[in-house]
Structures are given as structure tokens and as C-alpha cells.
Image (tube, grey):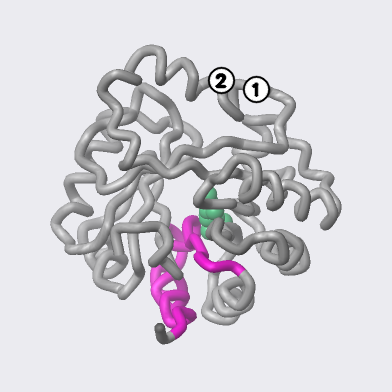
Amino acid sequence: MYNVQDWQHVFKLDPAKVISDEALEQICESGTDAIIVGGTDNVTMENVLDLMSRVRRYPLPCVLEISNVESVIPGFDRYLVPSVLNTAHSKFQTGQLQEALKAFGHMIQFSELSMEGYVILNPESKVAQYTEANTQLSSDDISAYAMMIEQLLNFPVMYIEYSGTFGDVEMLKSAKSQLQNTRLFYGGGIDDLQKAKTMLSVADTIVVGNIIYTDLKSALSTVKAKKEV
Ligand code: 1GP
């Protein structure tokens, strides 16, 4: 369970948002496979540490999706390192990573890191605006990114990110058709069981975020999309 290959369903908690102890308990005991701690804005060492120590009370993997170098702390089971492919800004592909390696490369346990090839497709999302992602992509573009991520970059994860809106399942199919070993993550707008099942019928792993903060019951219902293994 401590390997991304084993996850079908994960909840993504934003360290900049407030969650009660009761809600956190239900999320962590829901049967989800892991908790990803990650967000775009206002992610600090303090709020990451606070959330990690609260999630740590429960026996499930807790991983950090790195948003910025300042908020990286030890103690997570794994670190997901996003590299945004559909941005013109190299700092979101490799630039920040190179800076981080320059400063901390000597103390990094590389076996604890998993690279994620991110393709951002919702132009309205904060992350698309922040990275100035080119979201106008065809299914052929997506297939080519998938090929690149698996065959050339050898990343363990391709992440199709529609954060805030429910995406186009055809885009997922285009990605999936090129992937044998790389795991396909999907995140965006999953707010009920049906949507969770639809995306998990193509993606290997679904990520459920925002709905945790607006409708906990619906968020919890998405875990039932997991298939028997
Ligand atoms: C965000 O992909 C995740 O990074 C989940 O998206 O918040 O829309 O569920 P939502």
C-alpha cells in the first residue's frame, strides 16, 4: 500500500484548508488507499506539518505532493514530484526541481520520490493559471504526452489534472492507450460515486479533493468505486 502502484482511490487534502478532527477521521478510515497532502496556494511548512501529524494517527500512507521547496519536511511515506509538461515555463517542468537538488540533493533519499508527469486540462483551475498551462490539447496531444512520460521519461505516474471540473473521459482513454507500466492518475470534479466509477473505469487511480470540504458525505461515497483486487 505504500507504493503508488497499489492505489485505486486517494484523497488529496489541502494544507491551506481547514478540516475538523471528525472529518479527518472519516476520511482516513474510509477505506481510501492513501492521503496526498498537496495544494497550490499558501502551502507552508507549518500547515504541512500540522496536517501530516494529524493524518499520522491513522494507519494509511501519507504522502506529500511537493508544491514548493519551502514546505518540504521529512516524515512522509513518499514524496510525489510534479513536473508539468504542458507549460511553456521550464521552472514548472524541471527548474524548481533543479534548484531543490542544488540545495538539498545531498540529503535526498531518491527511493522515496516518485515523479509525476502532469498534464493540466482545466483552464479555469488555479494550477493552470499559476503554471500558464496550455490546456487546448487534442487527444493526439495527450497520447504523445503519455508516450513521452512512459517511454522517454520513465515516470511512474502520469497525472491528468482537471482540478475543479469533471474532465473528458476520452482524454483519459487516449492517455491510457499508451501506458503499460506508468500509472494513470486522474483528478478533477469527482463529487459522487458515479463520477468516481466513470473515471476509475479508465484511470488506474482517482484523486478526490475539493468535495471533501463542501460535502463530506459525497466525498466518502466515492471510495466505493474501488474494484476488488
Ligand atoms: C486536485 O486532482 C485533484 O489536484 C482533485 O481535484 O479538487 O476537483 O477533486 P478536485
Residue 5 rendering spot, x and y as whole percentages: 42, 62
**Residue located at (48% from left, 41% from top):** 115
- The answer to whether residue 204 is magenta is yes
In the image, the segment drawn in magenta is: 203-227
**Residue located at (76% from left, 52% from top):** 142
The reply to whether residue 167 is visible in this rendering is no
Query: Which quadrant does ligand 1 occupy?
Result: bottom right
The kind of residue on which mark 1 rests is Ser
The kind of residue on which mark 2 rests is Gly
Name the residue that disc number 1 marks. Answer: 90
- The answer to whether residue 42 is magenta is no
Q: Nearer the viewer, residue 89 or 181?
A: 181
Left or right for 86, reference 229? right
Mark 2, secondary structure of its residue:
helix
Residue 122 rendering spot, x and y as whole percentages: 71, 49
How far is the residue under mark 1 from the one under mark 2?
6 Å
